[in-house]
Structures are given as structure tokens and as C-alpha cells.
Amino acid sequence: MKNEIIKNKAFMKLWLGSTVSNLGDSMDNIVFIMLAIKLTNSPSATGILMMIISLPNFIFSILGGTVADNYEKKKIMLYANLGQGLVTLIILILVMFDKMTFLALCILLFIVESLSRFNTPAYMALLPSIVEKKLFVNARAFSLSTQSVIGMVGPSIAAILINNGYTLPIAFDAFSYIFAAFMIGITSIKVSILKKTKVKNIFTKEFMNDIIDGFKYLKLNKNLLSIFSLIFFINLFLGFFDVALPFYVKINLRLPTQYYGYLKTMAIGTFVFASFIITKSTILKPGKISVLSIFPMGISLIVFGLSKNFFISSIFWIVASIFRCFIVLMLNSFYGLIGDDQYRGRIMGMSTMLYATIVPISNGLSGIMVQSFTASVIFILSGFGLLLVAIVYLFNRSLLQYKIN
């Protein structure tokens, strides 16, 4: 399967552009936070900046998805990446001439993230058209595995480059967007595949009706609604981990903080490993794999929560992480497969908004729960909650029996 994906020239060009762009993104997460602290000399600046750059997820995700359904997707991706590159170049110039302010940084990064909310739905909506349906899950796994590796490498590179100033990492970030735009520009996509529709002005009532129509489509598509509800519950429970894990290491395992880092590294490593397995596999029933994978993950989390031994905890943490990867990849690919072409952009936009909404809520609930329960109890309850979700979805025959033709 992997060889067939690599032979797809259109996909590989987009993948290469996206990979370089993701490397820039993984670096700027560190660079711009450190720059904000330097400009303000205030740790709270980090929270303010993160809040501002997360706002486009809520504001523009649905709008970006609707634009992707009404305009030529390749052009949206091209202009969005060029726009991100040019705005990042403005940041670079202001930093080089020592004219950057915290307010300007927040505004410019808000624009960069807003443009991303148009690029991502267009890319995800276009992907099923350039990759065979039977290879779609494999292609997503291939992309996410490289993205995970970059997620580990990027911050380290940024930390090294920052020692010599902010110019070089920001310049690379700007280059990464422009390179991605170049790769999009040279990618040959047949006009018939793009399925051009009547271009609508985004400020018209007709365009607003298109947004509402996307929600109506989601409501009427039972499989799609089932996937979105499953994504909601999975992320509700999985979001508890980020807050509870360091407390678990300190209280349950009675180990120093670096062991928390070891567990996080294991999770990323197993994600890459599991993604590689999926890349090489033939996936026919993603719904069935998603639901059945919840059982071993839930059981592993229960044992993990009960364990007070680092070796045993590590084994079940790795098992839980592997099946977590299976679930995430299957669900993220599944909704891209079953939606109609004319609604695919809006589906991607709604999924982005769902993720952006549920993860902060889950983290907030976890913060409250840590004050009332031990971290081990949170993992145990999460495990039982996931098992309950899996049992309920075992009765969803339509989701379980869906087969990729």
C-alpha cells in the first residue's frame, strides 16, 4: 500500500509541501511563545497569545469549509499559503529591525492562523479526489506519521536556533509556507476532479444558507453523525490525559518529573509506529476497527490507572497509545470518505471546530477533577467510560459494516 501512495505524484507533491510547512509550524510554536515572553517579560503573555491564535478555530473553521465547497480548492490552498508566508515575512522584518510589539505579534499570528482555517479544509476536501478511496486511510496514516516525527524534531530545532536569535527560525517558517504554495502550484489536478461550482460572495444570504445546509447535511447523514458523536466522546475522555498524567507520575509512581516526559515520548513514538502499520495495511472497515480498538484502549487505561510500577505502566500506556492511534486515524479518515464531494469542505470545517471545542472543555474538566480525585481514578474512570462508549457503538451496525469499495 505504501508503494502505491508514493507513486501518486499529486499526493506526494502536496505531502512534501505540507511536511515542510508542518516543520515550520512545529518550530514557530516555540519561537513565537519565546518571542512573546521577550517582548512583555511576562509569563501570562503565553496564555494570551495561545488564546488569540486559537480563536480562528472557532471563528473561521465553518466559513473556511464552506469556501472550500464553493471555490477552486487548489487556488484556496495556494493563496492561503502565500498569505501565511507574506504575513510571516512581515513578522520577520519587524523582528529584524526591532520594531515588533506584542500587539502586532498577536494580530499578525491571528491572521496566519485564520488563513490556515481556509487552507486545511480545502486540502482535506481535495485529498479524497487525488487518492484512491481504498488508499485514503493509508495516505492519511502516511501523512500523520511524518507529521508526528516532525512534531518531535521541530521544537528541538527551534530551541537550538533561538540561541542565535529569532531571525533564522522565523525566516524558515516564512519559507515553509512559500515552499508549500510552490508545491501546490506545480501539482497537476484535473479540472473535472475539482468540480467547480457557482462562485458565491461570502457576504450574501446564499452563502450563509450554504453554511446552514452543511449542518443539515450532517444531521441527515447517520453515519457521519455517528462518527462526529464518537469523536466527541473519544476526545472528551482522552483530553483528561494531558492534565492528569504529570500528577499520576508524581503521586502514583512516585517518580520525578522527567518520567512524565518519558511517557509522553512513548506516546508519540507509538503513534508513529501505529501509523506505519496502518500505512502498510489494507483497511476495508474503518468503523469496525475504530469501535473494536476502543476496548483494548479502555482496558489498558484501567490497568494503567491501577498500576504503581513504572514498567507495567509503560507497557499498558504503549498499548493504549497504539489503539488510540488506530482510533484517531480511522475516524479522521472515515468522515473524509463518506461525505459527498459538495459537502466535504464543510464536513472538514465542522470536524475542526469540534476538536477545537471539546479538547479545551475536556482539559478544563480534568483540571477540576484532579482537585477532587487522584490522577489514577481519572484514568480508571476514563477507561470505563471508553468501554461504555464502545459497547453502545457495537449496536451501530451501519457504522460497523461500512466497507471501503
Image (cartoon, helix red, strand yellow):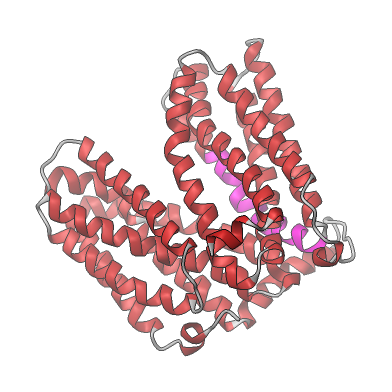
Residue positioned 18% across, 59% down in the render: 305
Q: Which image quadrant: the N terminus?
A: bottom right
- In this picture, residue 204 sits left or right of residue 182: right
> Where is residue 196 drawn, in percent x and y?
86, 64
Q: Nearer the viewer, residue 160 or 45?
A: 160
| Total numbered labels placed on residues in the image | 0
In the rendered image, residue 90 lying in the magenta stretch gets the answer: no
- In this picture, residue 317 sits left or right of residue 25: left
> Where is residue 338 drawn, in percent x and y?
62, 76
- In this picture, residue 340 sits left or right of residue 354: right
Where are the magenta residues, as a range? 51-70
Question: Main SS of the magenta segment?
Answer: helix
- In this picture, residue 70 sits left or right of residue 280: right
Dividing the picture into quadrants, the one containing residue 11 is bottom right
Q: Nearer the viewer, residue 215 or 290?
A: 290
Q: Is residue 277 visible?
A: yes
